[in-house]
Image (cartoon, grey):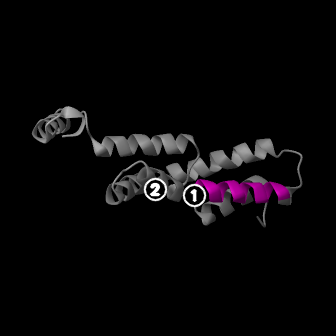
Amino acid sequence: MAKGYESAVVGRVMRWLVDVGFVDDEAYAQSMVRYCLSRRLGRVGTLRELMRRGVDRSLAERVVAWFEGTDAFVESAYELGRRVARKTEGMDVEKRRRRLWGAGGRKGHDPSVIRRVAEDLFGVGA
């Protein structure tokens, strides 16, 4: 009996909230993926954030896989790359590439995608 509520009452209220759609784990996970994409996170970073927020791993993987099929994480990587490019304008190209690789790694982007973004933004040999 936490906070003075009977466990039976809590159970009924929780079932009601699920039934009327106020508690929807999948909708929450989808919303969190959109939030992660707005922060330019990659697939791994998004999975990590979903699980940190309490989303079940299998649900997180399923929702992330769906978004991955839309190329949302590729676009997220390109947006990150454009941001790094703007911030590092005028710097040596190698330093710009390192900054992109560092940011991409921290954000959980796939190395093959970061390589493609680096080549597109900073030239061949990235």
Q: Are marks 1 and 2 in contact (CB under 8 Å)?
A: yes
Q: Position of residue 123 (x, y in %)?
A: 79, 59
Mark 1, secondary structure of its residue: loop
**Whether residue 79 can be seen here:** yes
Q: Earlier in the sequence, mark 1 or mark 2?
A: 2
Q: Position of residue 103 (x, y in %)?
A: 68, 54
Q: Amino acid at mark 2?
A: Leu
Q: Is residue 103 left or right of residue 36?
A: right
Q: Is 49 a magenta residue?
A: no
The chief SS type of the magenta part is: helix
Looking at the image, how many numbered discs can be counted on the residues? 2
Q: Quadrant of the N terminus?
A: top left
Residue 118 falls in which quadrant of the image?
bottom right
Residue 6 % position (x, y) = 13, 37
Kind of residue at disc 1: Gly
The stretch in magenta equals 95-108
- Residue 96, located in which quarter of the rendered image? bottom right
Q: Is residue 43 above or below residue 21?
A: below
* Residue 41 spot, x, y in % from top left: 56, 50
Side (left or right) of 38 relative to 22: right
Which residue is disc 1 drawn over?
108
Give the residue at mark 2: 47
